[in-house]
Structure formats: C-alpha cells, structure tokens
Image (cartoon, rainbow, N blue to C red):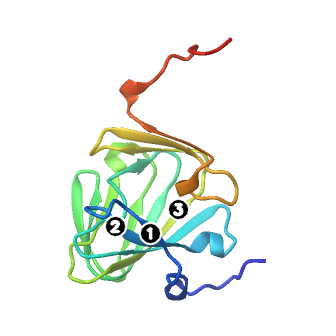
Amino acid sequence: MAPVVKNVYEAAGLPMQGGDGEKFSARIAPIGAALGLTGLGMMFITVAPGKRAFPFHNHLGNDEAFVILEGRGTYRFGTQEHPVGPGDVCAAPKGGPDRAHQLINTGETDLKYLGISTNNDPDVVEYPDSGKFAVLAVAPGTSFVDAHLKFIGRAEETGDYWNGEL
C-alpha cells in the first residue's frame, strides 16, 4: 500500500526533468502516484527564474489547480495575467482556449508549486500559442509523459476517417 503522507520537499529529491532548456525547464516530482492516488493527479514543480514548466495550454477533459508554495511568478489565464506568490491558488478549469493557462517564474528565486488535477482519461490538450493539440490516453500506472496513446499535431493535419481501412 502507498503511503498516505508524503513530504513534497523530500519527494523532490528524485524529480523528473522537463522542458527544452531554453524557455521551458522544470523539476517535476509526481506526488499523486507516490500517494497511490488514481483519480487525482498531483505534482511538485520547481521552475527556475525566467522559465516555465509547460507551454500555455488548456485541457478539454481535466480541471487543474496550482498552489504556490515559494517564489513569485505570473499566472497567464486566457487573455489575463495575474501576479502570484506564496499562498496563492490558481484555478484552471477545463474548457477551450479562453481557459488556457501557464505559470511563468518572473521572480528572482525558484518558483515552487503543487499542480493538482483530475485524472479523467483520455484528455485533449490545446496549445493556443502554437496552434497544436495533443490527444493523450494514459495507461494505468503511467503518466502523461509516457502516455499509452499520444498524438500531437495540428487540426489541418487530420487524416481521412476511411484511410487505410479494409
């Protein structure tokens, strides 16, 4: 049985690395899986100054919330930007591009926060800044990083429904 109590700072000792290193870079520790949660996802995320963990995006199938623990940043939500700091909670309800969101570390120290989400599967994620979308189906025991089925593309790349069918 998974533990029912986990210290996020201790869990951060074995983080996953994410991002392209230029604009996107983060240390991500999957807390929800370590606690044995299946319907609720939780990650402890650390972002260096000037970086972001993820592109600006919205989920069509999952709600998210972010609890700022340390540091300062800017929360992009739709067309708005909000300054955030310790104790702030940012909502990211599922929906279209008007609900797209992103945390940017605009402070001078690491931005540390919990990302909490529903785990509805599959999920469709849109990326308004780049015009991409992703369809993700996550097999039990895995994460979005190693999704069972994953397609990332653009709407204009859609194939014909009957193509290749016998």
Determine which residue is flagged by label 2.
25
**Residue 14, horizontal then vertical, whole percent:** 53, 79
Q: Is residue 13 left or right of residue 100?
A: right
Q: Secondary structure at mark 1?
A: strand
Spatial CA distance of label 2 from label 3 is 20 Å
Q: Which picture quadrant has residue 82?
A: bottom left
Q: Give the amino acid at mark 2.
A: Ser
Q: As displayed, is residue 24 above or below residue 79?
A: below
Sequence-wise first label, 2 or 1: 1
Spatial CA distance of label 1 from label 3 is 19 Å
Q: Secondary structure at mark 2?
A: loop
Q: Residue at x 31, y 62 (%)?
A: 24
Spatial CA distance of label 2 from label 1 is 7 Å
> Which quadrant would the N terminus be assigned to in this image?
bottom right
The answer to whether the residues at label 2 and label 1 have Cβ atoms under 8 Å apart is: yes
Determine which residue is flagged by label 3.
117
Q: Callout 2 environment at 10 Å: few (<14), some (14 to 19), or many (20+)?
A: many
Q: As displayed, is residue 166 above or below residue 159?
A: above
Q: Give the amino acid at mark 1.
A: Gln
Q: Is residue 26 left or right of residue 82?
A: right
Q: Give the amino acid at mark 3.
A: Ser
